[in-house]
Amino acid sequence: MFHKYAFQVSTLSAVRVRFAPSPTGYLHVGGARTALFNWLYARKVGGVFVLRIEDTDAERSSTEMVDGILDSLQWLGLNWDEGPFFQSQRKDLYLTAARKLQEKGFAYRCYCHPSELNELRLQAEKSGKPWKYDGRCTALSPQDHQRLDAEGRTFAVRFRVPQEGAVKFQDIVFGDVEFSHDQIEDFVLIRSDGLPTFHLSVVVDDIDMHISHVIRGADHLSNTPKHILLFQALDAPMPAFAHVPLILGPDRSRLSKRHGATAAGAYREMGILAEAMRNFLSLLGWSPGDNRELMRTPELIEAYSLEGISRSSAVFDLQKLEWFNSQYMQLLTAEELEPLAKEKFIQQGCWNPDWEGESRQWFLKTLELIKPRMRSLNDLTGASRAFFADDFPLDMAAKEKFWKDERLSELLSQLAGEIDGIDAFDATTAEQALRTFADKSGVKAGLLINAARVALTGQAVAPSLFAVMETLGKAKTVRRLQAAAQILTAPAS
Ligand code: GLU
């Protein structure tokens, strides 16, 4: 007998997808990409995005990990419509399903002790055969069960995989997939400690939550035949399956810490914008079918389709992410950047509440001014720190290069005086003052401009000096020019 099961199209009418992380670690980049693909699909077709925490493995799961995962998903803007549901709170559902499967003959008790199974496995390995549980406990009668129970033996519950035939299905990404039944062992549904396994809980939940499309990592492809057998045995409508390709490092080995941070949250720390991250992740194994790469989220949603997911592994390229990020720094308006900047300043302990009060216009204008040179949000408290705080670092290379001229200590001090004398201080009047002063002193304006830029920002490269002066205001400009003059006067230590 040969079963043919082809399920390209979900037999459920409403689109409901889920992201089902196991909280045994932080949210990995691969997990974030899986979550994003589910989210994009739900948003594209007006479906429901469910969040389910697969925490049945109590020893390896922790609430800190759960919080970390939720936090990263929130940061990425992947808002869920239902959940989070916790499998640890749904155990009864799985046990009921296991009972039902036993009643109907789809599952049976296995009293084999782990040491016994281990012995069998070793024997198989010795004789060069691949190990597969041989189904010896299927032969046990109810009387045998009673006897073994009386002996105090514990049992696991195994699914009875039909001996003949094959599971065939059509994965949306990988196309026709076939596993003959003899490749699949009678897998465990309930372990001898009474805990449901991943296979059982995932299918019971997908049924209970009416999941129409299972979109998950390709590492689960080999689990899918087992899941399909369970869906059938539980007489449930079959979801469609889409397995998304692996993510590799640039050397084409599986993405690992060697290639850079693998925790999605680490990119937040690096000052990556969530929207840039979404765009970057979306292209790890998916494409809109044309050459577009830079796509803001509404455009991504519009372009998204499961058919656009590719079968070949995706390569994680950190430089590309950095490129996306600098593009997004330019694409976002100052108003869009404002809450993100606030979050970053708060995180770094240098947020000034005035910036959303009386100085809000100044704050927005300053963001606008520094945006063109920003590569990440971290530049706010890094290279652009001088705009927001007085304790900014002085770049040594900039100092070397632009504070060489011995006349500068005198010149900067005098320039401070000139600036101080301006009544209507702004970029234009500051420029006039500086150029007039340069002429008067017989030096090139460039000498003063470069030296003053280092004095005001600590950096060799910054926006137009006069715009910088206007942003800092007269008092700070004067103070910093004087401070620089003083450093230059002080004998080198
Ligand atoms: N909990 C599984 C994992 O973290 C995902 C299961 C699934 O998506 O079906 O890999």
Image (cartoon, rainbow, N blue to C red):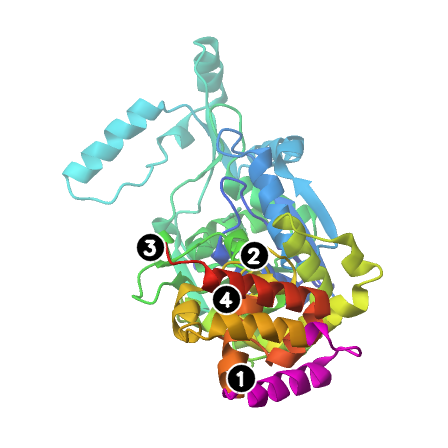
> Disc 3 on helix, strand or loop?
helix
The mark that comes first in sequence, 3 or 2, is 3
What residue did someone put label 1 on? 289
Amino acid type, label 4: Asp
Whole-number angstrom distance, CA of label 4 to CA of label 2: 33 Å
Q: Residue at x 59, y 74 (%)?
A: 414
Q: Which residue is mark 2?
A: 268
Residue 420 included in the magenta stretch of the image? yes
Relative to the observer, which residue lies in front, 190 or 283?
A: 283
Q: Is residue 42 visible?
A: yes
Q: Is residue 212 above or below residue 107?
A: below
Amino acid bearing label 3 = Arg
Mark 4 or 1, closer to the camera: 1
CA separation in Å, label 3 and label 2: 19 Å
Residue under pointer 3: 258
Residue segment shown in magenta: 419-444
Q: Nearer the viewer, mark 4 or mark 3?
A: 3
Image marks 3 and 2: residues in contact by CB distance under 8 Å:
no
From the image, state whether disc 3 or disc 1 is nearer to you.
3
